[in-house]
Amino acid sequence: MEILREIAESLGQGEDEKVAALARAALEGGAAARDVLERALIAGMADVGERFRRHEIFLPDVLLAARAMNAGVEVLKPHLAGEGVPSRGKVVIGTIQGDLHDIGKNLVGIMLRGAGFEVIDLGHDVSPERFVDVAERDGAGVVGMSALLTTTMQGMAKVVDLLQRRGLAGKVKTIVGGAPVSGEFAREIGADAHGYDAANAVERVSGLFQAIRNARTS
Ligand code: B1M
């Protein structure tokens, strides 16, 4: 679809108002919100990342692209998230300590809320203690961590360890995700699940709550 390509290009140029207007037009023209997200916004951002890696563009350009991405996501939000669904469980999410990338984590939050989960979003640069303190205080069943940097992803292991040391492992399950994070890494650090994108995160979180319910009834 031509308009999806146009959205991706406008995102690459950091044109936030144009991205929002085109996203609205795409929805009005019958495009599915999921397609606009994946084939226009996420595809556009992947291209930005590639050009940044090749030093064709610089950090301020990436920031503008991130702002344009957020403008597009705002338009899609009501179409991605359902309203008024009873809570299926409480999930604490955040981007790991030292890491400021929050676009993917925000998408995971939107999709989880849309699927009926109660989401406590701690934002970015979240310490292991804060993840665990809030999960314990608010009785969350799942802690979801996002990392975009190879230098910060090890922080996820600290959260898993801290849950164990506080005797919460098993009661509070963990899911990890973000571009450099793999299923293999999740297994290595003892996380309960890995989500490769926001929709997959919803499936995995549903599975984790099912496992908690099964453990209670057995
Ligand atoms: Co930065 N950055 N960045 N950046 N940035 C990357 C990650 C990088 C790969 C770019 C590159 O070099 N090609 C590179 C990391 C290299 C590495 O670690 N090996 C990089 C770098 C180096 C940096 C800085 C160090 C640059 C510098 O200062 N010199 C710096 C670090 C700052 C810090 O965090 N301390 C930095 C800064 C920034 C900005 C602030 C400018 C901006 C972030 C703005 C923001 O988030 N508010 C930014 C951006 C935008 C990017 C890229 C271009 C795009 C990231 C993004 O939003 N993708 C990125 C390149 C890339 O990834 N291609 C890059 C779109 C988003 C929807 O995808 O976050 O992967 P993603 O989320 C997906 C899945 O991963 C998954 O679902 C989402 C939806 O499908 N997912 C989960 C994510 N979290 C999940 C959690 C789950 C489950 C699934 O369960 C809980």
Image (cartoon, rainbow, N blue to C red):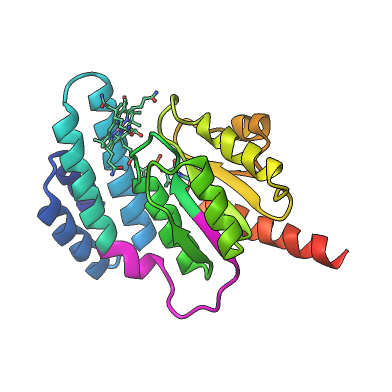
Is 165 on the left or on the right of 31, as rendered? right
The relative height of residue 119 versus residue 101 in the rendered view (above or below) is below
Residue 195 in sight from this viewpoint: no
Q: Position of residue 37 (x, y in %)?
A: 34, 53
Residue 58, percent from left and from top:
16, 26
Is 188 in the magenta? Answer: no
Seen in the image, is 77 located left or right of residue 90?
left
Name the residue located 39 percent from the left edge and 46 percent from the top edge.
104
Magenta stretch, residue numbers: 75-92
**Observer-nearest of 156 and 48:** 156
Question: Which residue of the protein is positioned furthest toward the right in this rendering?
Answer: 218
Q: Quadrant of the C terminus?
A: bottom right
Q: Decide which of 72, 135 is in the foreground and name it.
A: 135
Residue at the location (69% across, 41% down)?
Answer: 165
Quick check: 102 left or right of 199? left
Residue 83 on the magenta span:
yes
The residue under the point 24% across, 56% down is 72
Q: Residue at x 42, y 77 (%)?
A: 83
Observer-nearest residue: 199 or 60?
60
- Ligand 1's image quarter is top left
